[in-house]
């Protein structure tokens, strides 16, 4: 897959996420201002959805046309292609190490918690 095509897919995904955020932000703004969230384009599409879509597409197009942001994104995609990704075996081994370490620390914290529970139990019983 070419760098431009990959960047296009990532840009589309970012635009969709931005649309979801802006839709909720516009809806919050309308509610806060006491304005109704009227339906546009029929009865199924609220105004906040349309405004959020227009804002997100506008921002995405503006950033796409801005040479600095576009060049930065192309360079980022090219750098990710240079990364040496771990093999499946290495990933499995590292995952096992992380899981075992997590279990050991969980047991350590559980034991520490039990000691403190016992100590505070003894201290509270002395006062009674």
Image: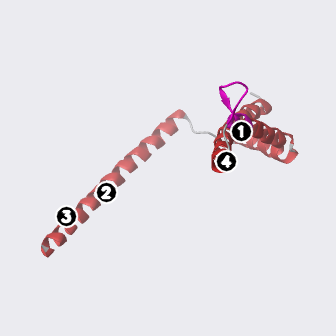
Helix, strand or loop for disc 1 = helix
2 or 4: tag closer to the N-terminus: 4
1 or 2: tag closer to the N-terminus: 1
Magenta-drawn stretch contains 122: no
The quarter of the rendered structure image containing the C terminus is bottom left
Residue 101: where, in percent of width, then height? 39, 50
| Cα distance between the residues tagged 1 and 4 | 12 Å
- Dot 1: few (<14), some (14–19), or many (≥20) neighbours within 10 Å? many
| Cα distance between the residues tagged 1 and 3 | 56 Å
Residue 94: where, in percent of width, then height? 48, 43
Quick check: marks 2 and 4 in contact, CB under 8 Å?
Answer: no
Q: Which residue is mark 1?
A: 52
3 or 2: tag closer to the N-terminus: 2
Q: Is 69 left or right of 34, judged from the image as shown?
A: right
Q: Which residue is mark 4?
A: 29
Residue nearer the viewer, 44 or 65: 44
The magenta span reads 38-51
Q: Which residue is mark 3?
A: 118
The quarter of the rendered structure image containing the N terminus is top right
Residue drawn at point x = 46 percent, y = 41 percent: 95
Vertical placement of 29 versus 51: above or below?
A: below
| Cα distance between the residues tagged 4 and 3 | 52 Å
Residue drawn at point x = 14 percent, y = 70 percent: 125
| Cα distance between the residues tagged 1 and 2 | 49 Å
| Cα distance between the residues tagged 3 and 2 | 15 Å
1 or 4: tag closer to the N-terminus: 4
Residue drawn at point x = 67 percent, y = 50 percent: 33
Q: Nearer the viewer, mark 1 or mark 2?
A: 1
Q: Nearer the viewer, mark 3 or mark 2?
A: 3
- Dot 4: few (<14), some (14–19), or many (≥20) neighbours within 10 Å? some
């Amino acid at each position: 897959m070419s760098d431009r095509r990959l960047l296009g897919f990532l840009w589309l995904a970012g635009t969709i996420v931005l649309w979801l955020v802006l839709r909720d932000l516009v809806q919050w703004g309308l509610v806060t201002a006491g304005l109704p969230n009227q339906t546009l384009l029929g009865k199924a599409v609220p105004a906040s959805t349309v405004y959020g879509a227009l804002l997100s597409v506008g921002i995405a197009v503006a950033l796409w046309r801005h040479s600095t942001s576009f060049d930065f994104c192309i360079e980022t995609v090219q750098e990710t292609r240079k990364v040496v990704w771990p093999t499946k075996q290495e990933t499995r081994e590292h995952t096992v190490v992380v899981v075992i370490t997590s279990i050991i620390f969980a047991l350590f914290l559980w034991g520490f918690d039990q000691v403190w529970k016992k100590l505070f139990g003894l201290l509270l019983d002395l006062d009674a």
